[in-house]
Image: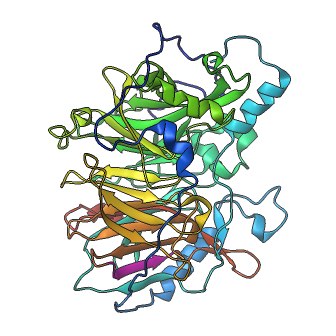
Amino acid sequence: MPGHARHSIPGARRALPTIPGARRALPTLPGRAVLLTAAVLIMLAGCSTEKTNGGADTRESSAMNQNSLQESARQSPALQGRKSAEDRPGRWRVAMGDGGRLSGEQLAEIERLESIGYLSGSKTATGVGGVTVHDRTRAGHGYNFFTSGHFPGALLMDMDGNILHEWRCAFLDAFPECVDIVLDERTQHWRRSYLYENGDVLGIFEGVGLVKLDRDSNIIWTYDGGAHHDLEVMDDGRIFVLTRDAHRVPRLKLGSVVLEDFITILSSNGEELDRISILSAFWDSNYDRALLALKMRRSGDITHTNTIEVLDGSLADRLPAFRKANVLISFRKLHAIAVVDIEARKVVWLMAGPWIGQHQPTVLPNDHILVFDNGGETDISRVIEFDPVTQEEVWRYGGSHDDGFYTKSCGTSALLPNGNILITESDNGRAFEVTRGREIVWEYRNPARAGSRSQLIATIFEMVRLPESFPVGWAEH
């Protein structure tokens, strides 16, 4: 495998750097800014509901594509050590820095934390799969690129549900030294992926590393630095990716080990260029008292950072913290989003809002922010658009107890060029496009099934809509 870039080891125990200077008090902010220290109160907030309309043409995808994904699921990694079809590898839902010597208990906890991925399970499968709604006059155009919980790879699909190309890489082919975790949930699928115009792809094995393949699924390089959840590729080829490390952080004074998250920058060849501790970014900022909310979690995956977006500066005239090259991130466990100044290596903006366990905050061209509100234990998910300056909500697509739009984990939302919103309801293996009038004009349900009665449906982690101009001529190979 040429060009491998192995520069850090997932099991390394890195100590959190000591940040000089005393902690500063949290300043009083103007307006209606909501601070992370109030995030614990958000858990008590209720979620309003609203009905949705689905008045669009209904179409079944071709049996060929359903069968091909079913076969792809059957070809997932070996079932060694698994007792039943329900225990199949992959992610399925039943559709319905050491500052001292570590104890044996702490070492065991580190091993447990490093293995955190996404457990199998989901809503009970309906038997309906593929593209089930396609209103050709109102839906967007282009190609759909996504990762599915049934196999370690990614898929390229047209708007009618026809699979145009598949990339696949077994975990041990990418990380042969990690044979001890080959049966972990996180090794059976890619959590997130990125497609280059020449057909190369990047894929994240959750909490383990990053692999780059060519269009024929040959490995170009791998990075084993604990990559997880999300990444972004810049025009200059640099890769911004979330990474993590399980260890004890003496400064938290918890006496237990935690997962510490980092913003890591790689070269186009997978060489690690920089690594910014998110905990240190808090300590070295005016938001250091927000760490009190971290201490309340006591141990484990205390922040669960799940999104990274490099800002283009379009919002900086209204919010200077959003200047170009700063990074927007999301903390699922703290129900908050923040901006990190990469040069200053500190948090410069922070907000908790009317969401629980959120994912995928993204700045829109109109200076608003779109965020996927998972909803916690409410059984209702929402997509919210709001003005980060006034804190006012300007649009919402909300589920209800009747329509069942809900994913407790994962989930994404993205603005399309036609103004519609593409939503990924991950746990239910569903992606759909809604108009601003909240009508569903395109819908895809993952046809990959498992279980003795085909009652399990594979997760869709993120559906990405690529423009019609995206070059896919190489897919014919």
Is residue 103 rendered to the left or right of residue 368?
right
**Percent position of residue 179, x then y:** 72, 40
Point out the stretch of residues depicted in magenta: 438-445
Query: In this orientation, which residue lies closer to the viewer: 138 or 464?
Result: 138
Is residue 353 rendered to the left or right of residue 394?
right
Above or below 451: residue 360 = above
Query: In this orientation, which residue lies closer to the viewer: 85 or 282?
Result: 282
**Percent position of residue 206, x then y:** 57, 45
Query: In this orientation, which residue lies closer to the viewer: 50 or 404?
Result: 50
Tell me which colouring the rendered structure shows. rainbow
Looking at the rendered structure, the number of numbered marks drawn on it comes to 0
Q: Is residue 67 visible?
A: yes
Q: Residue at x 20, y 65 (%)?
A: 417
Judge whether residue 341 is colored magenta.
no
Residue 345 occupies which quadrant of the picture?
top left
**Percent position of residue 3, x then y:** 44, 32
- Mainly helix, strand or loop, the magenta region? strand
Query: In this orientation, which residue lies closer to the viewer: 360 or 12?
Result: 360
**Percent position of residue 163, x then y:** 42, 73
Image quadrant where one finds the C terminus: bottom left
Q: Is residue 222 visible?
A: no
Above or below 264: residue 310 = below
Question: Residue pushed farthest top?
Answer: 20
Q: Residue at x 30, y 86 (%)?
A: 135
Q: Residue at x 61, y 47 (%)?
A: 171
Above or below 234: residue 81 = below
